[in-house]
Image: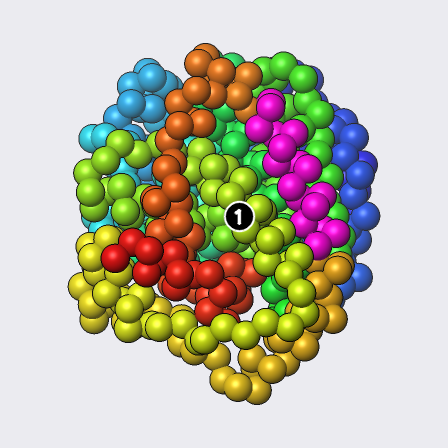
Amino acid sequence: MLHNLTCRLCYTIGVMQTDFSSLSIPCTIQSPCGCGFCGALQTKNIVFCSVESEELARCITMLAPPLASVLLITDSYTYQASRRCFDKRLGRLSYRVKTHIYPTLPCDTLRQANAVSLPEDCKLIIGLGGQTIANLVKYIAAKNQLPAAFILTSPMASSILTPSSVLLADGLPQTYQTASFKTVVADVSFLMQTDRDTLAVAFADLVSHAVSLFDYQCAKLLNGEKFCGHVYQQGCDTIDHALQLVGNDTLQRTQYALIFSMLGQRVGSSRLQGGAEVQAAHTAKMLFTYEERPLRTMGEIQFLFAQKIVALYRNFLSKGESFFVSPPDNNMRAERIEEFLGLDCKTATKKIRPIVSSKTAQLQAYRFREYRDELLEHLLLCEMRLKSAWKTLKRLYTDDGFGMAHYLDTADAALCLALAPDVNDKFTLLGYMKDIGVMMDNYLQELV
């Protein structure tokens, strides 16, 4: 059960209320956590309710006094689908509401975030929508040093509670440190209308992070980064419970996504949502956008790359102990980034991971030999999760996954995997492979 948390997390549907222990997910996280790295939760309430519920009023009034100026940020589709329920409800609670409505579903770019102007004497920012709106709202709130709440309308929520926002700046994904939402209200009426394909996307988004969890282990063992074994195990358990869930239970799947997101908040970063599968998906998004090709959602692309990455990792970890490769050719990589992703060479050169020092390389190589067997064991479990997830995922789609199975070709996948460590410099096993020149440059040379 989830217990010993630093705040009470509510789960409310209509008038029924219980706590997250009803999910029966094992958790041994202590408060404070025994690892010494995890921080206290900033999110004080997670509530499932309708917009007319008194729970919504209670959560909002805890964050801003009556008559306060409040900014509601959403997109036109969600705003129209809600029939203006949310700003009307806020008005009845005696708030002065200004609404910023994106005319279409916004891109998660820094320019879109900076386009929002705050009303005078604003006391609270409220987002309404899914993960893209959440990224924008967290950044805007942090920039203006204001508290933020979020009304969730989508089951894709695996990064909603993380204290960070990933936005495109100058064509590249940048991670900005933010505060977490003080309150998250999951709107039951919206969630219950989720179609099968959207539910499939949400499932793909969550289970793809099995690779992020594995890279979390790699960052600890090879790079000496902070690590919490309780959070790691709870992340694995959450994905396992999502795999065991039978049927299209949207509310339960949303809960699992929020719990995984909460774990990201505990470690104080996007580490659990920023592994190699996310790096590669961001690269594919840049590639397909530059070439004006049809683009599937980030969650789907992450899952497709997660499958390829575990096979790549298994091959790498299974090699013999002695091998030599030349260091990466960063000049060639900058040229490929300019050619295929549309960035100018100067910007690409600044972003590319520098060649690691000899001392660091020797230490990481020693650790790699020392922990290779342990990493391979964790990887095989990760691979089993993804194989099980693929069977479930295909059956969530109305076309039984046909479109997903034929989306990525070999050349696109190879290019994106090769360039992914330079698009996002978070340490992953894929990044380590790039640092020592394994296979990555071969992918690029084959595309010349």
Q: Looking at the figure, which quarter contains the N terminus?
A: top right
Task: Classify residue 237 as left or right of residue 101.
Answer: right
Q: Report which residue position mark 1 lands on.
A: 309
Where is residue 144? Give x, y as percent: 34, 57
Q: Is residue 425 magenta?
A: no
User: Is 330 located above or below residue 134 in the figure?
Assistant: below
Disc 1 residue crowd, few under 14, some 14–19, many 20+, Cα 10 Å: many
Q: Main secondary structure of the magenta part?
A: helix
> Which one is in front, 196 or 1?
196
**Residue at the outermost bottom position:** 359
Residue at position x 68%, y 77% in the image: 366
Is any atom of residue 63 visible in this view?
no
> Which one is in front, 94 or 430?
430
Residue at position x 70%, y 54% in the image: 376
Task: Classify residue 87 as left or right of residue 263.
Answer: left
Q: Which residues are magenta?
A: 376-392
Where is residue 69? Give x, y as percent: 34, 41
User: Is 9 located above or below residue 342 in the figure?
Assistant: above
Q: Quadrant of residue 324?
A: bottom right
Task: Classify residue 347 as left or right of residue 396.
Answer: left
Q: Is residue 380 magenta?
A: yes
SS category of the residue bearing label 1: helix
Please state which amino acid type lies under the numbered disc 1: Ile
Residue at position x 29%, y 19% in the image: 80
Q: Looking at the figure, which quarter contains the C terminus?
A: bottom left
